Image (cartoon, rainbow, N blue to C red):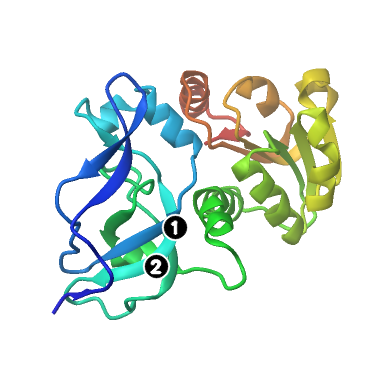
Amino acid sequence: MDRVHGLDDASHAVDGGEDGMAGLHAVSGRPAPGAGEVLVSIEASSVNGLDTIVRAGGLRIMTGRRFPLGVGLDFAGVVAATGAGVHQHQVGDRVWGTVQPLKRHTVGGAAEYVVVPADRIGPAPAGVSSVEAASLVVAGATALIALRDTLHLTSGERLLIRGAAGGAGTAAVQLAHAMGGHVTALSRGRHAEALRELGADEVFDYGATTADQIGPFDVILDTVGSQLNGYRRRLTREGRMATIALSASSMAAIAASSVHGGRRSAR
């Protein structure tokens, strides 16, 4: 039997329309979880780079052209109802999670309620507010997957993080420091002190620094999506490079890397 707690018959969500503008709309009826799903009462949701790209129409090939599109990949809140077969989560549990990023949504994380598969949420960390938790889900997971699973950063390696003051960038600085990497951060100069406090060993102002002035590096994590070929040349012989930026230039650099191969990789 489905379990429900504290719901009324209406909810609201933020969406992006065909003109790219965000708006608040009422969701018809009350969201109800199906088998294997949970309904989460949202307390906080963050805005990520993908949200702005989707709103600008940059991923139409995946999201389609039907509107409205729900805004918000991640969220933090409380389980309000569970569908049949869900046993790992209970009504009242404080959780954080994400919607499926490659699926078209009329309701995303920026809503009062959202229905997601039960495996897309987990217990929210204790001692952290919902706002803080929501800001960490996508940015933190992106940084962790990039450093640990894609780039295989190991202790003692020299790492460059481009766009180090952004959401994923600040998470990557802290994670890389904890993993034993020697962290070089590239950002606006005004962020230097904060980045050093987060664990960066060196910080350079991107406005006053060109690729050929720094390095070489064993690993480069890019969050910007531009000048990738220039930074790729700053890798050591067995160096690895990954970008998490979605842009035409980053896709072209990845395609060129795949075609031409060589000792340095862009992913």
- Mark 2 and mark 1 residues within 8 Å of each other at the beta carbon: yes
Q: Which residue is mark 1?
A: 43
Q: Compared with residue 139, is residue 190 higher up or lower down, i.e. above or below?
A: above
Q: Can residue 106 be seen at all in this image of the molecule?
A: no
Residue 108 placement, left or right of 176: left
Callout 1 secondary element: strand
The residue depicted at 53 percent of the width and 29 percent of the height is 261
Q: Which amino acid is tagged 1?
A: Glu
Between 8 and 49, the one lying in front of the other is 8
Q: Where residue 108 sits: x, y (%)? A: 33, 46
CA separation in Å, label 2 and label 1:
8 Å
Q: Compared with residue 237, is residue 18 higher up or lower down, i.e. above or below?
A: above
Q: Where residue 70 sits: x, y (%)? A: 30, 39
Callout 2 secondary element: strand
Q: Where residue 145 sits: x, y (%)? A: 53, 53
Quadrant occupied by the N terminus: bottom left
Residue 110 placement, left or right of 135: left
The residue depicted at 76 percent of the width and 33 percent of the height is 186
Q: Which amino acid is tagged 2?
A: Val
Q: Which residue is mark 2?
A: 78
The dot on residue 123 is none
The residue depicted at 28 percent of the width and 35 percent of the height is 69
Between 92 and 204, the one lying in front of the other is 92
